[in-house]
Image (cartoon, rainbow, N blue to C red):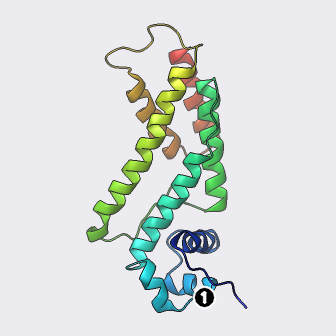
Amino acid sequence: MKKHYTTKENLLEVCKECAKEKGINGFGMRDVAYSSGLALGTIYNYFADKESMIIETLVSIWKEFISSIPNTESFIEYLESIINIIDDIEKAYPNFIKNHPRHITDSKVEKAKELMTRELQSIKEQIINALNNDKSIRINVFNSVLTKESLARFTIKNILSAKNKEDKDVLLQIVKCAIY
C-alpha cells in the first residue's frame, strides 16, 4: 500500500522524485497521483494545473540547492561549492538547467520568472555576502563598473550557462585573476 501524502511539501517531494525519474518536463499530475497514492482530483487541490506544479517543483529544487551551499571564508571556495551543487542537481535532475522549464505557457511565464528571479536574487545575495567575507580579495578591486553585485550576476549567469567542467574551470580562473 502506498503512503498517502497530505501536505503540499510532501507532494513537492513526490514531484521531485518524479522529475528525477522522468525529467522536469516529463512528469504530470497522473504520475504524482500514482506515486503519492492520492486520487488525481486531490492533486488538483494542491496544484491548479501541470504548469503550476512544474513551477513549484522548480522553486522547491532551487530552494533545496540554495540551502545546501556552505558558508566559507573564501569566495572561490564558495563558487566551487555552487558549481559542485549544480553538477549534483544536473545528475539528479537530468537537463534541469537546459530544460528549465520549456513547456510553460505565456500565461504562466510571468509567474515562473517572478519566482525564479526571487530565488536567483537569494543566490546573488549569498554571493555578495561571500565576497564581503573573503579577506584575501585585493583592496580597491571593486569600482563603478566591477561592483560586487555585477560580479555576482556575472558568476551566476556564467555558472548556469557553462556547458562543461572546462568552462567552469575557466570561469573560476578568470574570477581569481580579476579579484585576487
Q: Position of residue 64 (x, y in %)?
A: 58, 54
Expressed as whole percent of the image width and height from the top left, the position of residue 172 reads 58, 29
How many marks can you see?
A: 1
Q: Nearer the viewer, residue 69 or 101?
A: 69
- Closest to the observer, 31 or 41: 41
User: Going 56% across and 86% down the picture, which residue do you hit?
Assistant: 33
Along the line of sight, which residue is nearer the eye, 121 or 97? Answer: 121
Q: Quadrant of the C terminus?
A: top right
Task: Kindly give the residue lying farthest to the top in the view shown.
Answer: 139
Mark 1, secondary structure of its residue: helix
Question: Is residue 99 in sight in this rendering?
Answer: no
**Picture coordinates of residue 3 (x, y %)?**
68, 84
- Residue 5 visible in this rendered orientation of the protein: yes
Residue 60 to residue 67: above or below: below
Q: Which residue is mark 1?
A: 34
Q: Residue at x 55, y 47 (%)?
A: 66
Question: In the picture, residue 93 is in which quadrant?
Answer: bottom right
Closest to the observer: 5 or 77?
5
Q: Name the residue: 37% across, 49% down.
A: 117
The residue positioned 48% from the left and 84% from the top of the image is 43
Q: Quadrant of the N terminus?
A: bottom right
**Residue at the farthest left position:** 107
Q: x, y percentage for residue 23?
A: 57, 70
Q: Amino acid at mark 1?
A: Tyr
Dot 1: few (<14), some (14–19), or many (≥20) neighbours within 10 Å? Answer: few
For residue 61, side relative to residue 41 (left or right): right
